[in-house]
Each structure stands twice: as C-alpha cells, then as structure tokens.
C-alpha cells in the first residue's frame, strides 16, 4: 500500500531539496525518489507549475555539448516552503497523536 502524496507536500519536498542546492531535472527526480515514488513525467509538470508561480527560477549550464536546465528556489519559494513545512508539521503532529501511544493513557488503561 502506498500513501498518496498531496500536491502541497510534493511542492514542499521539491522546494526543500532545492533549498539545499540547485538541481537539474533528472538529478532532482533521482533525489525525490529516495523519499517517494515519483516519475519524471510527474516531476516536470510540478517544476513548471512552481516556476510559473514564482517559487523557482531556472538557468542553463553546458554539460558535454548540451545544456542542462537547473532549478533554483526563489525568495518567494523559500517563504512558500516555510508555509508548507508548518502545514506538514501540524499535520504530522496531529497524526502522531493517533499513531504514537500516549504512555500516560496506556498506563491508566493497564491499571
């Protein structure tokens, strides 16, 4: 079973990686695949949307006679990343209240 990743969380993961360093598309997809299952055909529309929204910018660098398009987070992207991270933290904390047993509650139940 796979847990579905929302668009907001996907955006946050991409922005978090780009907040560490700039990546070209294929390398970014490979990094993302360390955390979640994602294909290049899914990744590139996300990158285009984030760029259109002003969260990313691009630049080209020559590599073996071709250009690689690198993605770089913008100031606006960093602010958006902070918002997504806060939403994720709040969501994770609320789920942890269900998934992680409360030791006091468990002790009272056992008594």
Image: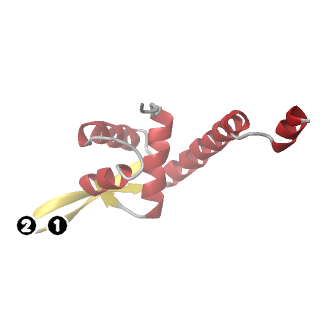
The residue pinned by badge 1 equals 62
Left or right, 75 with reference to 92: left
| In-front residue for pair 1/32 | 1
In which quadrant of the rendered image does the N terminus lie? top left
The residue tagged 2 is 65
Hey, which quadrant is residue 90 in on the image?
Answer: top right
Question: Which percent across, then down, holds residue 25?
Answer: 27, 52
User: What secondary structure is marked by label 2?
Assistant: loop
Farthest left residue in view: 65
Left or right, 90 with reference to 5: right
Q: Residues within 10 Å of mark 1 (few under 14, many from 20)?
A: few
Q: Quadrant of residue 10?
A: top left
Whole-percent x, y for residue 97 in the image: 73, 36
Q: Position of residue 52 (x, y in %)?
A: 37, 39
Question: Residue at horizontal 36%, vertical 37%?
Answer: 49
Q: Give the side of residue 3 with respect to residue 28, left or right.
A: right
Label 2 Cα crowd, 10 Å radius (few <14 / some 14-19 / many 20+): few
Which residue corresponds to the image point at 7% horizontal and 66% vertical from the top-left?
65
Label disc, if present, on residue 85 of the rendered structure: none
Q: CA distance from mark 1 to mark 2?
A: 6 Å
Using the image, determine if residue 15 lies above or below residue 45: below
Give the secondary structure at mark 1.
strand
In the rendered structure, are the residues bearing label 1 and label 2 in contact, judged by CB atoms less than 8 Å apart?
A: yes
Which of 88 and 18 lies nearest the eye of the viewer? Answer: 88
Give residue 28's quadrant in the image.
bottom left
């Amino acid at each position: 079973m796979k847990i579905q990743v929302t668009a907001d969380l996907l955006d946050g993961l991409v922005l978090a990686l780009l907040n560490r360093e700039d990546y070209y598309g294929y390398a970014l997809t490979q990094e993302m695949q360390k955390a979640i299952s994602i294909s290049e055909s899914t990744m590139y529309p996300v990158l285009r949307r984030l760029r259109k929204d002003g969260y990313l910018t691009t630049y080209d660098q020559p590599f073996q006679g071709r250009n690689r398009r690198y993605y770089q987070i913008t100031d606006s992207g960093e602010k958006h990343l902070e918002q997504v991270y806060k939403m994720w933290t709040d969501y994770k904390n609320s789920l942890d209240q269900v998934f992680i047993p409360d030791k006091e509650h468990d002790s009272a139940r056992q008594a």
